[in-house]
Amino acid sequence: MSARLETQFAGVTFKNPVVTASGTFGFGREFEKIYDLSRLGGLCTKGLTLTPRPGNTGERLWETPAGLLNSIGLENPGVDAFIENEWPHLSGIDTVTIPNVGGSDEASYVGAVEKFNDLPVALIELNISCPNVQCGGMAFGMDPDQAYAITRKVVEASTHPVVAKLTPNAPDLVAVARACEEAGAAGLSLINTIQGMAVDIDKRRIVFDNVYAGLSGPAVKPIALRMAHQVIHGVKIPVMALGGIATWRDALEFIMIGAACVQVGTMSFVTPTAAVDIVDGLEQYCADQGLANIDEVRGIL
């Protein structure tokens, strides 16, 4: 692979700007059977919390036209189990591995993040935006003051740069983004899923036990593109953009409005090779356009 796609984000060098989104790639083991994960620019882990979580009850996934509703509820084995069972394997893969960390209060966020302090991870993605947990995540990401407070606590506790992952459900997303920047976040990622719901007319019931769930997939891309554009122009720190990216052309739209990196999520369920297909497409685009590096078109709009 050439250096045409090499990308800088918060002082970290990515071989290309394509990163797999948290919650859609597990810890990479299933996809590793399909392609070499070192072809990725980066990999965001499934969301991790200080202690194991069983996740939500009832229906968890529901397909929609051009999208997917999920109500997983941050099911995960906990940080300790991840460090013991998954990190030794992931650390041997030549890509940027980014642990995604969530919590329900300041203590659980800080406690989880501190466990990574002695590990050579490049970045921590701070999930202050999960729409499926009844307490904690969504509340922190909805309000600029709370977003500032939790981001500041985590930045102070972490030895690694922190990337705050934002919820599109916030009343003023740019204000939340600026609050995270002021709190010391090295970068931002957005958008997380958009709150939605589903009704099963055959069973005459609301599909999800939690009533509302998170919508992702191509249906949300125009909204994600608009929100990414607003935030990119509202802050000085770099942005990883995500939301409905299915092809290299989608990825290039986000890059042209100024995204440093892009994350690929739901499309990996539809086409398991989606992320590396996008890498190949961007590489070919740069070659066809005679670009020495994709930076030449980053932020041109």
Image (cartoon, rainbow, N blue to C red):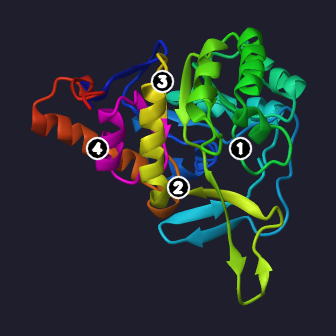
**What amino acid is labelled 1 in the image?**
Cys
Residue 151 appears in which quarter of the rendering?
Answer: top right
Residue 262 lies, in percent from the top left, at 43, 37
Is 248 left, or right, of 113 in this rendering?
left
Secondary structure beneath disc 4? Answer: helix
**How far apart are labels 1 and 4 at the CA level?**
31 Å
The residue drawn where x is 71% and y is 40% is 47
The residue drawn where x is 15% and y is 28% is 291
* Earlier-in-chain disc, 1 versus 4: 1
* Earlier-in-chain disc, 3 versus 2: 3
Crowding at dot 1, Cα within 10 Å, few <14 / some 14-19 / many 20+, comes out as many
**In this view of the protein, which residue sits in the foreground, 96 or 226?**
226
Is 272 left, or right, of 108 in this rendering?
left
- Asked if the stretch drawn in magenta spans residue 254, the answer is yes
* Earlier-in-chain disc, 1 versus 2: 1
* Earlier-in-chain disc, 3 versus 1: 1
Which residue is label 3 attached to?
234
Secondary structure beneath disc 2? Answer: loop
Q: Nearer the viewer, mark 3 or mark 1?
A: 3
Which residue is label 4 attached to?
280
Residue 157 appears in which quarter of the rendering?
Answer: top right
**How far apart are labels 4 and 2 at the CA level?**
19 Å
Which residue is label 1 attached to?
130
Range of the magenta residues? 241-262
Check if mark 1's residue and mark 2's residue have beta carbons within 8 Å: no
**How far apart are labels 4 and 3 at the CA level?**
31 Å
**What amino acid is labelled 3 in the image?**
Gly
Secondary structure beneath disc 1? Answer: loop
**What amino acid is labelled 2 in the image?**
Thr
